[in-house]
Amino acid sequence: MKLQEKLLQYQQSGRAILAANFYNYETLAGILRAAQAENEPVILQLSESSINYLGLEIAAKLARAALSQFRVQGWLHLDHGATPELAGRCLDAGFDSVMIDGSEKPFEENIKITSQVVKMAEAYGANVEAELGFIAKLGQQHDVDGFTKASQAREFVESTGVNALAVAIGSSHGFYKQEPKLDIGRLMEIRQSTAVPLVLHGASGIPDEMLRDAIRNGIVKVNLATESKNAFMKELKSLLFSTDEIDLRKVFPPAIDAVKEIITHKIRLVSMK
């Protein structure tokens, strides 16, 4: 099943699918062990920096081999692709889905580059995600002026033919300095203006019930990166400071388990179990 079909299926059933970033084999294994145990599908995400770190071909083949080994239904997705060129390279490498992020560009330019990637992806039958509005990245501040407007969302989707849309409703990337507050009313307006599946970025740190409320009101794909990466590193640091062990095969497994634990919780949460 193509990812765009799965997103529509989940939209109709009032559920969401977890999209989790991985950075190496260990974080990938933690994600897939959780998905396997819960018998739920998952989207594996790679950012440009992770692709540069692992190498595009290695990263894509690693994800495919791991999905097969763990027998998990999953899709490989480019997270926050900055250029059509990168999206094209990922499509050539066999990615099921790509995100083109023109959210910090003028509205018309965002439409232009998104339309370009949508057209490019047609030959591959791939899903395309875009972002509209301002979702703060690490070190950036956000305010309501940057939230996605329902009227623009409708125009953007109709103009580009994009399959999924990441919306700005109060979330941000990285850790929150204070408890986030999602604008569910704004989300409902966007949902009423367009039938395209909606995506929530910056799910790390959002209270469980607030996240469920967002899913009930139109969020179909939930992105997670910071919480799982933090869980891995905290556990690994704790082990390294308490042992002289040099065998990586002995110090990594508890860190993998830490990723599995947080991913298991998030999968249960977004699948509305």
Image (cartoon, grey):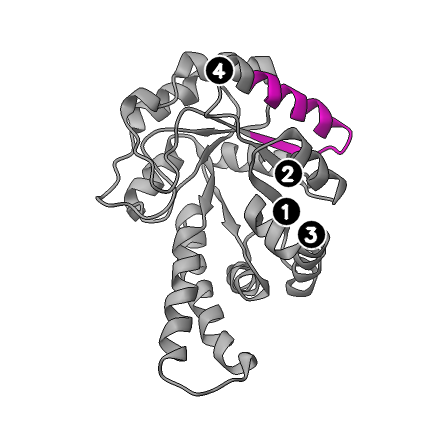
Marks 2/1: CA–CA distance: 6 Å
For disc 3, the marked residue is 60
Q: Identify the residue at horizontal 39%, vertical 55% (top origin).
A: 227
Viewer-nearest residue: 103 or 165: 103
For disc 2, the marked residue is 97
In this rendering, position of residue 101 left or right of residue 59? left
Marks 4/3: CA–CA distance: 32 Å
Instruction: Where is residue 83? Give x, y as percent.
Output: 61, 31
Marks 1/4: CA–CA distance: 27 Å
Marks 1/3: CA–CA distance: 8 Å
Quarter of image, res 98: top right
Q: Identify the residue at horizontal 60%, vertical 55% (top origin).
A: 53
Does the magenta run of residues contain 115? yes
The earlier-in-sequence mark between 4 and 3 is 3
Quarter of image, res 191: top left
Does the magenta run of residues contain 1? no
Marks 4/2: CA–CA distance: 22 Å
Indicate which label's residue lies in the foreground, 3 or 2.
3
The earlier-in-sequence mark between 2 and 1 is 1
For disc 4, the marked residue is 107
In what element is the residue under mark 2?
strand
For disc 1, the marked residue is 76
Q: Amino acid at mark 3?
A: Ala
